[in-house]
Image: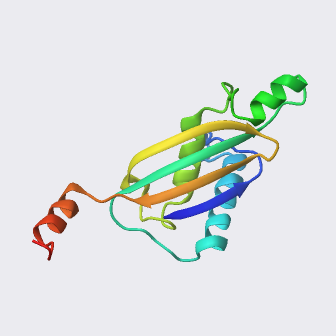
Amino acid sequence: MIIFTIPGEVTAKARPRVTRYGTYTPEKTRNYETLVKEMFHITYGQLMLEGELGIEINLYFQIPKSASKKKKELMEKGHVRPIKRPDWDNCGKAIADALNGLAYRDDSQIVEAIVKKYYSNVPRAEVYIYKIQSEYERYLESVLDPRD
């Protein structure tokens, strides 16, 4: 299992911008994807997973300064969760796309994903990537089990 943390405020993947000079990815998205790559590389170097993968991403957003003391306490405990932008899917996409060619060949290898949003005094994203055993691999194990 791969586990690493991306510090700082989570950034969603923005839509590509089209101009008369071509299409480009907004700078904020490029910067966040670079941070994701750097944090992975610092933690795991050149590790690349093969096969079917699952990913869990826990997103922690800064608790608003305007929240009451009671509400801040509920947010810290996870009883009140963010129902604001950015959307969970755009945040997950930014992280999954950034890891293409680094943690895995392509994010098409991800066959299951979980993205959760929380509040915290320490904004960050925690990423868990794990190998999923396919039905075929389970079948082979059962057929080739030496205990039989």
- Does 132 sit above or below residue 19? below
Q: Residue 70 falls in which quadrant of the image?
A: top right
Residue nearest the viewer, comparing 123 with 104? 123
Residue nearest the viewer, comparing 80 with 57? 80
Q: Quadrant of the C terminus?
A: bottom left
Q: Position of residue 6 (x, y in %)?
A: 69, 56
Q: How many marks?
A: 0
Residue nearest the viewer, comparing 45 with 94? 45
Q: Position of residue 73 (x, y in %)?
A: 82, 30
Q: Position of residue 16 (x, y in %)?
A: 58, 41
Q: Position of residue 29 (x, y in %)?
A: 67, 48
- Does 45 sit above or below residue 35? below
Residue 15 in view (yes/no): no
Which residue appears farthest toward the front when viewing the image?
147
Q: Residue at x 70, y 42 (%)?
A: 60
How are the residues colored? rainbow
Relative side of 102 to 91, left or right: left
Residue 43 in view (yes/no): yes
Q: Residue 39 falls in which quadrant of the image?
A: bottom right
Q: Residue 71 falls in which quadrant of the image?
A: top right
Q: Residue at x 30, y 60 (%)?
A: 133
Relative side of 127 to 140, left or right: right
Q: Residue at x 77, y 28 (%)?
A: 74
